[in-house]
Amino acid sequence: MPATARTYWLTTPCRIRRHDNSLRIERDGHDHTYIPITDVRDIIAAAEVDLNTSIISLLNKHRINIHFLSYYGDYAGSLLPADTATSSHTVLGQTRLATDHDASLRIAASIIDAAAFNIRWTIDRRLLHEPYQTLKTKLKTATSREQLMAAEGNFRRSAWETLDTKLPDWLQLAGRHRRPPANAGNAIISYANGLIYARVLTALRLTPLHTGVAFLHSTLERHRHSLALDLAELFKPLFAERILLRLAGRNQLKPHHFDTNTEHAMLSDAGRKLVITTIRDDLATTVKHRELGRNVTYDELIYLDALALTRHCLEDQPYKPFRVWW
């Protein structure tokens, strides 16, 4: 994939058709948009998209993923090309670790620890210090995946309660509610999480790892790429809770960004565009990498973490899940 290739975000209903070696985006009432296929890394469809076999063939030929979000912003599925990057040697090493109880538990615990560290950095280091220390203690004594996830759940409840203290009443989570979200704050979190899951899946598809073999989430889950769920835990705080806090703090979120009723809430078209634009810009933000000695984008950090896990599976190099250092 060319280095210049990028993600395209579709926020309004459209049709995608083939025009020679380009994509033709057709929207009612608008001129067609033409995108060279070599300019596309992947596509995230946040609205209804109409495809035909010709365009699917072109996307498959150039190994371009297209990810779909549901009406409520949850990840709905992906159209993925043939998996040519997966290596049997890597998958054997990955499976060996995943089926080794102690090794798998260590990786799962390290992911939970790093994700909690990132949540604490995002929300409030001081107020979440004690819950984080409690989590670290429980991770050291956990003997099963269920115990790990129970400890993680306790920490996250503390984090969400702390998050609510920093939000206006109408954006408070009042607990985490999914599918569908119960209120405006949950709608933001769910939508951002779906977008990041899609970005992680794209990054993993560029490595020889198998997306169905995981360490924290169940590998038996047939309708999800479990390894993408694992790694998404590390990055969701940077784009979900952090963006909610930032948009609320800048007073950028307004009631017209949401469609609500008495049972659930969802982002309006304006709200989806606001969140997508914010996440897209954040993914392009750069930070000086401590080991590489060069600037990398947040988007590249996701890929680098997937590569680190690949090296652990192949070469047994220690895997240190991503932690915010700046």
Image (cartoon, rainbow, N blue to C red):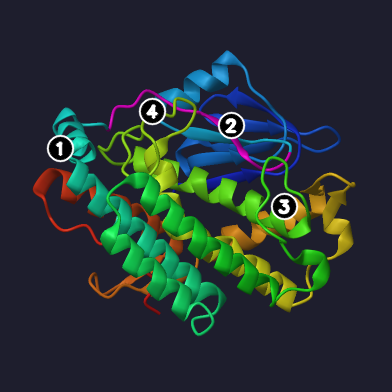
Disc 1 marks which amino acid?
A: Gly
Percent across and percent down for residue 253 are 79, 66
Q: Nearer the viewer, mark 2 or mark 3?
A: 3
Q: Earlier in the sequence, mark 2 or mark 3?
A: 2
Confirm or deny contact between disc 4 and disc 1 (CB under 8 A).
no
Judge from the rendering whether residue 79 lies leftward or rightward of residue 28; answer left or right: left
Q: Nearer the viewer, mark 4 or mark 1?
A: 4
Local crowd size for mark 4, using a 10 Å CA cut-off: few (<14), some (14–19), many (≥20): few
Disc 2 marks which amino acid?
A: Leu
Residue tagged 4: 220
Residue tagged 2: 23
Confirm or deny contact between disc 4 and disc 3 (CB under 8 A).
no
Percent across and percent down for residue 204 are 35, 42
Residue 78 visible in the current orientation? yes
Q: Secondary structure at mark 2?
A: strand
Residue drawn at x 83%, y 66% is: 170
Label 3, label 1: how many angstroms apart (C-alpha)?
38 Å
Look at the picture and state if 258 lies above or below 2: below
Q: Give yes or no for residue 79 being in the magenta stretch.
A: yes
Q: Main secondary structure of the magenta part?
A: loop
The part of the image, by quadrant, that contains residue 161 is bottom right
The part of the image, by quadrant, that contains residue 226 is top left
- Report the front residue among 17 and 310: 310
Q: Secondary structure at mark 3?
A: helix
Range of magenta residues = 72-85
Residue tagged 1: 93
Local crowd size for mark 1, using a 10 Å CA cut-off: few (<14), some (14–19), many (≥20): some
Q: Earlier in the sequence, mark 4 or mark 1?
A: 1
Judge from the rendering whether residue 265 lies leftward or rightward of residue 120; answer left or right: right
Residue drawn at x 76%, y 34% is: 13
